[in-house]
Image: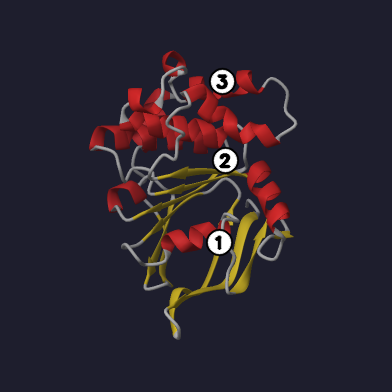
Amino acid sequence: MNKPVIQAKNIVKMYNRGTSAQVTAVNDVSLEVNEGEFVAIMGASGSGKSTLMNIMGCLDRPTSGYVILDDLEVSRLGDEEMAKVRNHKIGFVFQMFNLLPRTNALENVELPLIYSDKPDTSRLAREALETVGLKDRIYHHPNELSGGEQQRVAVARALVNDPEIIFADEPTGNLDSKSSCEVMALFKKVHQQGRTIVLVTHEADIAEYAERIVTIADGKLIDDRKNPNIRGEEETDENR
């Protein structure tokens, strides 16, 4: 059995609201994700699922509890050390794409490589765009791309550093159904290449692409189950 690549233990995240009130966004959640798993974290808006993802992905720190990535406790690292972990181990895909509007697709994908020591960053960015099917769109700016194409650029950007783990926060939230299926087929492909994927969504049909579905409600983990009928498996098998 594959080893845990993410271990979140007794995670609590509290925010101050006003002078005295506190809001508990994540309430004593423990979760392990094994190497090579495709896990969906599902829940309604405000359930705490994105907060949990941000903590596991080294974008935020818990109020209490801790996170271990590949045997390294990351939740208490300094900002610089956390940034290095993100840059080397993790790729992120967000709902709003987060592309720079005045920068073409190739340059957007190349951005994470600025802080790496890898040679020929332009070639690596080009290869990542080819991987997501955008070979002919590399010099297009975001406003010249459809929503689905912009999200594929974002996926290429997440892949360009060859990370072990991909975190995706509502990656289909701004897409139509056809583009959503195309993007999820891309995630399936990335998963089959051996990467660990943690995907946050409020949509049940999107969660069904994962092999395991974790449900969060009111900051608590209420369900954690294997998915017996993984969506897209038949299509993927046909394309192998």
Q: Which amino acid type is marked by label 1?
A: Ile
Give the mark nearest the N terminus, 2 or 3: 3
Contact between labelled residues 3 and 1, with CB atoms less than 8 Å apart: no
Dot 2, crowdedness within 10 Å: few (<14), some or many (≥20)?
A: many
Q: Is residue 11 left or right of residue 210?
A: right
Residue 179 shown left or right of residue 192 in the figure = left
Name the one closer to the observer, 96 or 225: 96
Q: Which badge, 2 or 1, comes first in the chain's sequence?
A: 1
Which residue is at 30% across, 42% downward? 174
* Residue hosting label 2: 195
Q: Secondary structure under badge 1?
A: helix
Question: At 54% from the left edge and 37% from the top edge, which residue is drawn?
Answer: 158
Labelled disc at residue 12: none
Identified at 61% across, 73% down, the residue is 65
What is the number of callouts on the image? 3
User: Crowdedness of circle 1 by 10 Å Cα count: few (<14), some, many (20+)?
Assistant: many
For numbered disc 2, what is the local secondary structure? Answer: loop
Mark 3 burial class by Cα count in 10 Å: few <14, some 14-19, many 20+: some
| Residue plotted at (37% across, 34% down) | 183
Discs 2/1, front: 1
Left or right side of 58 for 72: right
What residue would you read off at disc 3? 127
Residue 232 image position (x, y, % from top left) = 35, 37
Q: CA distance from mark 1 to mark 3?
A: 30 Å
How far across and down, in percent of the image, does residue 10 sit? 57, 74
**Residue flagged by tag 3: what amino acid is it?**
Glu
Q: Image check: 156 left or right of 181?
A: right
| Above-or-below relation of 3 to 15 | above
The residue singled out by tag 1 in the image is: 55
What amino acid is at disc 2? Arg
